[in-house]
Image (cartoon, grey):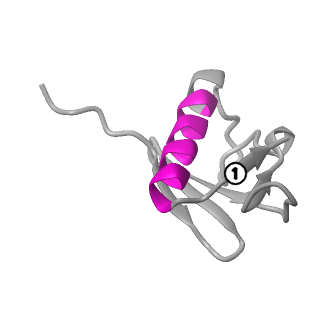
Amino acid sequence: MPKKRGPIVTFTDTGIHVEHRGRVLDIPVYESEEADALIELDAITHYADGEEIALEDFGTILDAIEKAAEEDGLALEFE
C-alpha cells in the first residue's frame, strides 16, 4: 500500500506556503513577542482557488505546519 502523502509546507519570507490535495494555500504570518511567528487561525478559511477548506483538511494542514516548524526549529503562536 502506498504511503499517504500529507501537505507540503514551505516557510517563506512573508508567510507559509502549503500544497495539499492539489490545492495551494498561502498563510500570512505576523510578528509575535512570544514566538518566531504568529498565525491568525480565523484567516485560514479558503484555498487560493477560493475553495473552502474542509475541517478535516484544516486539522491536517495545521498538524503539518506544526511538524515542519518543529523540524526547522521555529516556534509558532496560534491565535
Residue appearing at x 72%, y 73% in the figure: 14
Magenta segment includes 56: no
Q: Quadrant of the C terminus?
A: top right
Q: Looking at the picture, does residue 33 appear above or below residue 63?
A: below
Q: Nearer the viewer, residue 44 or 76?
A: 76
Q: How far across and down, in percent of the image, does residue 55 sit?
A: 66, 23
Magenta segment includes 62: yes
Is 48 placed left or right of 9 in the picture?
Answer: right
In the image as oriented, which residue stretches furthest toward the front?
34
Q: Nearer the viewer, residue 72 or 16?
A: 72
Residue appearing at x 56%, y 47% in the figure: 65
Q: How far across and down, in percent of the image, does residue 54 sit?
A: 64, 27
Residue at mark 1: 76
- Residue 4 location, quadrant: top left
Residue appearing at x 85%, y 39% in the figure: 42
Q: Tag 1: residue type?
A: Leu
Q: Look at the image and tell me whether residue 23 can be seen.
A: no
What span is in magenta? 58-72
Q: Secondary structure at mark 1?
A: strand
Q: How far across and down, in percent of the image, does residue 43 sit?
A: 83, 45
